[in-house]
Amino acid sequence: MASVSVDAVSLRYPNGTLGLADIDLTVADGESIALVGPSGSGKTTLLRTIAGFLTPTAGQISIGGEVVAGAGRPIPPEARGLGMVFQQHAVWPHWNVARNVDYPLRRARIARTERHQRVEEMLALVGLEGYAGRDPATLSGGQRQRVALARALVTRPRVLLLDEALSALDEPLRDRLRLELHALTRDFGTTVVHVTHDRAEALAIADRVMIMDAGRVQQIGTPAEVLSNPASTFVATFLNDATVVAGTVSDGIFSAADHPLTAPLIGGDVAGDGVAEAAIARQDVRVVADPDGDAIVRSSLFTADGGDLVVDWAGMSFRVKTVGYRPLHGDRVRVEVSGVHAFRQDTAPAAPPLVSA
Ligand code: ADP
């Protein structure tokens, strides 16, 4: 098991595209971290750089305290002690299940009897007992993904890299494999770096989440931290469908411009008074049934514990999550905002250009 340390890593592709810009990330030994962000934000580039398929243009990467890239000759991917699982279950079709899982052990020149035992053990762990002799073509997508997982974990890698490893699977299988993967890597104490476009998945299984945009780190924190204390309107919107509203801050109260909304500050980066942009998280908005209310429900989706709404309030759309009560499309309501995260507008760092001039 090992820690992963990414220090000031930048990467520019040969065509000039900036893939990563000055990334710092330390993943502790045994920690599980999820990389999330919009498409093109650099998640896969970072994972492939840690794996050794890409070489940083600047900065350094260490695994278990050993520098693997950025100083001297880079350590090749196969010598980095990693396990990897990708979205498309990369299972060799002409080998049976056991042979697929056995492959990394053969490469490591482990004796036949021990290999046999470890393959059996691993297949049992991923719920594939009795499948050793099966041809991969006769398996379901979920079973093939379990084979890929067994193969990635059979050598007990120091670090497991997952690139959308569960994304191609349908629910409820995906949910089950997510739970099993989480339990298995916790049992083994494996360090995990997991790229996913699925926010809920990232927040559910990672110890910490790193949100990326335009090749840069926007925020790193525990799921609770990044949800309750987003570092920017971008993070709040990306993770939590927050509504962003322009306005001003005075004495700790945010007032929207040309809109009746006022609410106390509960976070953000605003010190003192001035122009600001507020992110309003779904959990901080409440709607109350009111036939004379100045807001109207534009969309009302059913959820197990209430509703997922879009409410139009004085010309502005708000995402609202209700618990125990679900107004219907067209209902009149009153909106109450318990608090906002306000961010200075003037000093917000501009996103870097992705392509060099
Ligand atoms: P994500 O995984 O978050 O979707 P990527 O890491 O794939 O993002 O991409 C980050 C940026 O690098 C994007 O602008 C993308 O277009 C660019 N990129 C990715 N792969 C290559 C490549 N092989 N050559 C040039 N640019 C690339």
Image (cartoon, rainbow, N blue to C red):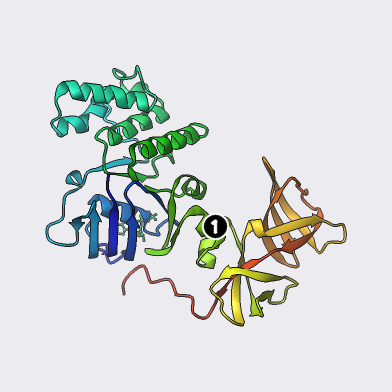
Residue under numbered circle 1: 227
Dot 1 crowding, Cα within 10 Å, few <14, some 14–19, many 20+: some
Front residue of this view, candidates 1 and 289: 1
Front residue of this view, candidates 246 and 298: 246
162 to 280, vertically: above or below: above
| Residue sitting at x 49%, y 79% | 347
Q: Is residue 354 left or right of residue 202?
A: left
User: Residue flagged by tag 1: what amino acid is it?
Assistant: Leu
Residue that extends furthest to the right in the rendered view of this protein:
292
Quadrant position of the C terminus in the picture? bottom left
- Is the CB atom of the residue marked by disc 1 within 8 angstroms of ligand 1's nearest atom? no
Q: Position of residue 277 (x, y in %)?
A: 59, 73
Residue 240, located in which quarter of the rendered image?
Answer: bottom right
278 to 240, vertically: above or below: below
Front residue of this view, candidates 233 and 265: 265
Quadrant position of the N terminus in the picture? top left
| Residue sitting at x 67%, y 71% | 264
Instruction: Give SS at disc 1.
Output: helix
Q: Is residue 330 visible?
A: yes
| Residue sitting at x 74%, y 62% | 336
Q: Is residue 36 visible?
A: no
* Number of numbered tags placed on the structure image: 1
Image quarter where ligand 1 lies:
bottom left
Q: Position of residue 133 (x, y in %)?
A: 29, 17
Q: Position of residue 29 (x, y in %)?
A: 31, 49
